[in-house]
Image (tube, helix red, strand yellow):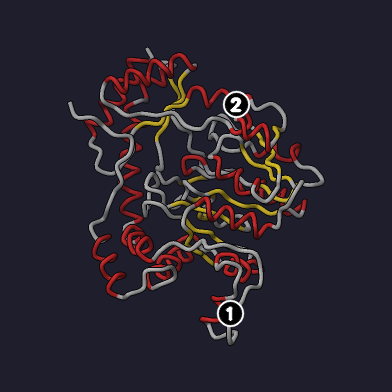
Amino acid sequence: MAKIPFNRPYTTGLEIDYIRQAVACSHLSSDGRFSRLCEQWLEQAVGCRRALLTQSCTAALEMAALLAGVGAGDEVVMPSFTFVSTANAFVLRGAVPVFVDISPDTLNIDHRLIEAALGPRTRAIVPVHYAGVGCEMDPIVGLARDRGLLVIEDAAQALGSTYRGTPLGRHGDLAATSFHETKNVISGEGGALLVNDPARVERAEIVREKGTDRRRFFRGEVDKYTWVDVGSSYGPSELTAAFLWAQMQQADVIRQARLEIWRWYHDALAEAERLGRLTRPRIPESCEHNAHMFYVLLNDAPTRARTLEALNAGGVNAVFHYVPLHSSAAGRRFGRASGDLRHTDSVAGRLIRLPMWIGMQRADVDRAATIVARATG
């Protein structure tokens, strides 16, 4: 019986051709032809004022922290149920992550709890669009505007998703997205900073260019470039961008293929949910999602352990997800929780992510779903 891996990176067939073209152009560092094509595609697809490719979503979040101007003692509100990069980017600047509980329906930050987490040192709110499902951005952005705060979207999983018809990554002042091999559109490693606030575009370019005004020099706006601000080397190589361009050209095809697999899972596990054995993902009417992942919430931690064991014994590589940041060693050291995070703790002990990749067959999905249904019965 063939094993079903958790992830298998999808390739379009054009990646190697484009990499060869990049090599033939003798431009292998950042900001060549393919980098420009990818950034222009993002600007059009998301509607952001400026898109800047980065080496990772982590790098994009670090740029966002620099652009937000946070420093020692400042606070940044975010969910605890997220990857460490969401917090690390701000901790590196000396800021304190303030962790807020999630909604049990979407596993996104509960927007109703954010206001209670705000204080005199709060500088930004960082909503994370879990599984490519949008947070309630209207009330989050409204609260931020009332309080003079920045909104920085962690849209690592959300390329191709929308909230109330507007692409995720377009709602905040800044956003970061990922092209890691586990995402929908990939380049192995890679990411992008999306800048919606026009007042931050020029400085974003400087921060990405090691703190220099190199971009202005290439546009002929200055006669030489020099060190003008803090920054680092955040741009990816042109080889990475060439691979990514092949993916972006098939982004719609990728999304539709993943949505079909997502629906297979959703249908296959409907009876198990009706019997009270698990909970399937909830997609709010306000959102169109990108089928980034399919997860199930089981009734308790022992059931999850039993189900994971059964899946792996059956040749299905399923996994859990985040250890909540507020309960991790670094989270206790660098951050603090706002209120009771009971939903975060509960979800973290009950969630299973099932295999999700283009090329899966209906039989693969049915096999995984059958094991889950039996193990939870």
Q: Position of residue 212 (x, y in %)?
A: 59, 72
Instruction: Quadrant for residue 360, please give it.
Output: top left
Instruction: Quadrant for residue 314, please give it.
Output: top left
**Type of amino acid under label 1:** Tyr
Q: Position of residue 113 (x, y in %)?
A: 70, 35
Q: Quadrant of the C terminus?
A: top left
What kind of element bears circle 2?
A: helix
Query: Which residue is at a point 44% across and 16% down the rendered structure image?
Result: 276
Q: Which mark is residue 343?
A: 2
Q: Quadrant of the N terminus?
A: top left
State the residue position of label 1. Answer: 225
Asked whether 54 or 168 is in front, the reply is 54
- Left or right, 281 with respect to 66, comes to left
Query: Which residue is at a point 61% across and 43% down the rendered structure image?
Result: 87
Considering only order in the chain, which callout, 2 or 1, is on the residue closer to the N terminus? Answer: 1
10 Å neighbourhood of mark 2: few (<14), some, or many (≥20)? some
Q: Position of residue 64 (x, y in %)?
A: 61, 56
